Image (cartoon, coloured by chain):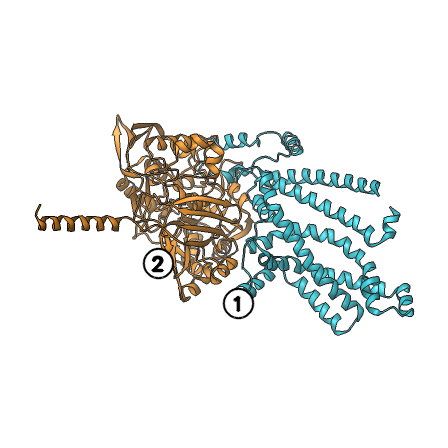
Amino acid sequence: MSRFLLHRLLQGLVSIVGASIVIFLISRLSGDPVQILLPSDATPEMIAETRRTLGLDLPLWHQYVIFAWDALRGDFGRSYRWQMPALRLILDRLPATILLAVCGLIFSVAVAVPVGVLSAVRPGGWTDRVGRIFAMLGQAMPAFWVGLLLILLFAVQLNWLPAFGYGGVSHIIMPAIALGWYPVAAQTRIVRSAMRDVLDSDYIRLSRALGTPERWIVWKYALRNAAVPLLTMLGVYFAAMLGGAFVVETIFAWPGVGRTVVEAVFSRDFPVVQAGVLFTSILFVLSNLLVDLTYGIVDPRIRDDR
Amino acid sequence: MNHWRISVLAALLASITAGAAAQIPKPATGNLTIAFAAEATMLDPAKSSAGVDQYFFGQIYEQLVRPDPSLKRVNWLAESWSVEDEGGKPVIDVHLRQGVKFHTGDTLTSDDFAFAYNRLRDNKVSKWSHLQASVEAFEIVDPYHFRIHFKQGDGSYVADNLQLWAMSKAYFDRVGDETFGNTPVGTGPWKFVSRTIKEDLKLEAFDDYWNPTQRPTVKNLTIKIIPEDLTRVAAFKTGAVDWIDSVPPSMVEEFRKMPGVTTASYVSPNNMYIAMDAIDDAVPMHDVRVRQAAAYAIDVDAIIKSVLFGQGERYAEVGKGEIGYDSDLKPYPYDPKKARALLAEAGYPRGFDIPCYNLTTQREPYQKEMGEAVFAYLSAAGIRCKVQGQEYGAWISFGRRDRPGHIDGFYSNMWGHGLPGDPGTPWAGHVHTYVPGAGWGITSVHSDPELDALIEQLKATMDLPERDALIRKIARIKHDRVAGGLTTYRPIVTFAWHDNVTFVGWPTPGFWRNLQQIGLKQ
């Protein structure tokens, strides 16, 4: 198990280094931050001075070496726009994004699992039909639209929830639903399909023959086995939510890292982009690692194989 | 003393006391939460890198001169100022208002403006050092009197409200650069309390503010940042915020009819125009008839009405209210027949194909759609646009001349120039011929020696009436020759507030979001 863990950690490290190189190169290919930073009537001397101050006059390889060495020591440079350490800018906002992604994931799983299971238990029945419509709606409605509809209904019409901002439990409900809405559809399909396979298997038939209550068969035996494919995808969904939180963060004025990084991309604020992408990569690797470890808990055979 | 004398004296004293009491403003009370669509990045005027930064620091810092709500330039921290001649070189002589205090309690003196000047001209600190480039020396005469000596005339310095922001030298010396930038201290009506990036800015009314009549009447102000239009509107409708900026153009009419809501609309100082390559002999727009054809081909009024929901003001070279505005100078009317005739006369009876570059990042509402509509009108007249979208970073770089190559077609562009507005600096940038390294024509794809000479003359002219006359002259020539691009419209921005709020719209030099006079109804 520890060898497996070490192996996955090394793989993750390679992925993170790879991501840092890719984002470093791509951000620099995308344009010159100095021309965005300075007024349009700035003189060529000012442009040259600013480029020198930011180290952008150095060869690309030299810039990367400086970046990598500083990053290893926890220094990602200062944001060109915000004039503050890029790492602080990201870390201050990371908890809000993680909270949003976790709540979005909890919402999607909380909806997808029962809907998927009920659809699988009675294929073709009304629960299955409703489940399919639900899944279709989930995939057809983008997060920004779901978010705006939620605001119109729960904030403007009913006045139950705040329309924007970051704070108590009431603030997280609508953003989490908007973010988790899209994955619900795919997760419902995964659960339904996995449950169908498991429910058709021999050991389930044997359980039924032995007179085990159907409720136990579905929710205890079958669901545990059907959960493995869903678990596999949860790591990916969590990472996708971290990366895709930008839209939801903008709609709900949620002070997360997604909005910060996307704005940094547009303003060519390289230190913030690099710090943001690197930390998202680390979270991606960690969430996948966590999923790998969870397999063993759900299915002891996988743990023993390792 | 006789009894009647005592009575008269007492009455006199009472009336004086009452008069003085009337002068003393009631202390600000209450809390108000409002929302802006965009967020400033820097709170330090010297390190500011974008106009939007004024949304925040413009509430805290003040200048010597500023435009009032009617856009009339008024003395602010300057009690008086004049432009004088000293040995053939201009000097701006400033007498400071006395009794002005910083939020720390320090008194504003000439030393603070000397400090501000040195900070603003240092290109290692300031992004605006070029604005101080014509200044030769800053001379302190006494604590409330200083003189700015110029190497040569700099009309923009006067036109742009004397450029300097009041910054506390004593505070900087006490706290250093980092705190100075993050915890700003100015002389303005609002004191900085706290800021959470991507969330809000908290301010408190400054009790010792020098201006007793034009000041906030609410004690605590929170400015929330809500970038999404519909969310901002929802926050307003639910009462979570009581004042919003940037009402979406499509909803302005709805807001105007909303009970319990007041709105105010202002023309923004951002001038939209369509740049066109006119320097290459090979391009059709080198011929003035083709440029005029483009001007006649576009129905700007129809686009404003249908794309912008009427939230734009058409202008011809110089906007209403700016120095040099000429009400007799009218925009080109929409006349597609004349456009085709001019094209044929110039040798293009079947029109021609040309690249047209559109900004796809929204800097102004519906700006991308505006560009698309303009290019569609050009295409209909025979100037067949091959439209290429550009996001903001690419668009900025593409428009500059200090890169290999230059714009080779039409290009949707804009230039903000503050309020009340003076086109001197914009014209130096996009009308004057490009001169590498000299600061002229940094985004220009036009060359006209007569206009170059006039723009250079304008740059040196510090007398405002003379400037006004010169701008009118340049505007007419520019208009006739469609030089430096085709002017289209200036966006209109609308604010809305609930009836429990009092608000008078004041501009900072660059924008209308100054909260000089905001409060709650008593």
Image mark 1: chain: A
Q: Which residue is mark 2?
A: B522
Q: Name the quarter where the N terminus of chain B is drawn.
A: top left
Query: How far apart are labels 2 and 1 at the CA level?
Result: 29 Å
Residue nearer the viewer, B461 or A250: A250
Residue A296 vertical position relative to residue A6 in the rendered view, above or below: below
Secondary structure at numbered mark 1: helix
Say what amino acid the circle numbered 1 marks: Gln
Q: Is residue B334 left or right of residue B23?
A: right
Camera-near label (2 vs 1) is 2
Q: Residue furthest left?
A: B2
Image mark 2: chain: B
Secondary structure at numbered mark 2: loop
- Residue A96 in sight: yes
Residue B101 vertical position relative to residue B204 in the rendered view, above or below: above
Badge 1 local density, few (<14 within 10 Å), some, or many (20+)?
A: few
Colour chain A is painted in: cyan
Q: Which chain is orange?
A: B
Q: Which residue is mark 1?
A: A157
Q: Name the quarter where the C terminus of chain B is drawn.
A: bottom left
